[in-house]
Amino acid sequence: MDSKTPLTIVKIGGNIIDDPAELSSFLSDFSKIEGNKILVHGGGKSATKMAESIGLVPQMIEGRRITDAAMLDVVVMIYAGQINKNIVAQLQANDTNAMGFSGADGNLILSEKRNHPTIDYGYVGDVIKVNTSLLETLISSGITPVFCAITHNKKGQLLNTNADTIASELAIALSEIYKVSLNYCFEKPGVLFDAEDDSSVIEKINPELYAKLKKEKAIHSGMIPKLDNCFNSLSKGVQKIKIGHHRMLQNAKAICTTIEL
């Protein structure tokens, strides 16, 4: 029997953030989660919209954003500023004592600039270390941390970091202390066989099925890094991972996708 205290980590995507009614509904569901919890948010759509409004052309490769200096300014402003503080304020209205963070705050998430053999991702970070002792102190004090998709390299440089990866790395690091369940919430009911058909939810995905679906191009784009993170997390101690609509947070019978090894 696992004697560790449960911890729920939830990541939400840009489509929920961009819809005020959906965001409000999600934050109400999130606030009702009992016990320790952490929220991680992206904000890709909002950052793209802002970038285009000032003449920048966003670039994506395999669901990951290329971040030059100008784009970094935009994502820091949108992710760590507007979105993060709006979410924290709404959680406070839901009686959840939230506190917003980037990875630089308290040196909570340390990253290094991505070094890829063929692609220059710009100011994009890959997580090296999570400050679990400070996070444990915050959580045990009744704080619900809310992370945006910005980390740092401890040399004064902020780095844009995939929010799915942040959620995954937090889950892996904290699984040494807590019994961690990881939930990826977005506007769909789960991973779909057919992206146009919300009733085509794949209720369980294991590595064999994942490889087959990738080969058939049934799974592509941003879902690839998300599922890669899921399987990595499960192999490193995370107890449970679900992908789906946020109704699954309060309804154990809600259809969603469970990731299994």
Image (tube, grey):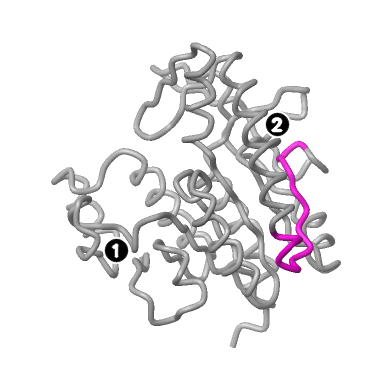
Q: Farthest top residue?
A: 55
User: Looking at the picture, how far across and down is residue 121, in whole percent?
Assistant: 48, 21
**Mark number, residue 4:** none
| Amino acid found under the numbered disc labelled 1 | Asn
**Label 1: how many residues lie within 10 Å, few (<14), some (14-19) or many (20+)?**
few
Horizontal arrangement in the rendering, residue 229 relative to residue 126 (left or right): left
Q: Farthest bottom residue?
A: 1
Q: Which residue is drawn at 31% across and 38% down?
A: 221
Seen from the viewer's position, the closer of residues 55 and 104 is 55
Residue 96 sits in quarter:
bottom right
In three-dimensional space, the C-alpha distance between marks 2 and 1, rounded to whole angstroms, equals 33 Å
Q: Is mark 1 on a helix, strand or loop?
A: loop
Task: Indicate whether 96 appears above or below 59.
Answer: below
Q: Residue at x 61, y 73 (%)?
A: 179
- Which region of the structure is painted magenta? 91-104
Give the residue pinned by disc 1. 206
Q: Is residue 157 one of those drawn in magenta?
A: no
Q: Which residue is drawn at 40% across and 56% down?
A: 231
| Amino acid found under the numbered disc labelled 2 | His
**Label 2: how many residues lie within 10 Å, few (<14), some (14-19) or many (20+)?**
many
Task: Indicate whether 113 appears above or below 233.
Answer: above
Task: Indicate whether 45 appears above or below 31.
Answer: above
Residue 80 sits in quarter:
top right
User: Looking at the picture, how far across and down is residue 245, in whole percent?
Assistant: 41, 63
User: Looking at the picture, how far across and down is residue 58, in whole percent?
Assistant: 44, 20
Seen from the viewer's position, the closer of residues 81 and 260 is 81
Q: Do the residues labelled 2 and 1 touch (CB within 8 Å)?
A: no
Horizontal arrangement in the rendering, residue 160 relative to residue 220 (left or right): right
Task: Indicate whether 17 appears above or below 184.
Answer: above
Give the residue pinned by disc 2. 152
User: Looking at the picture, how far across and down is residue 10, in whole percent?
Assistant: 56, 60
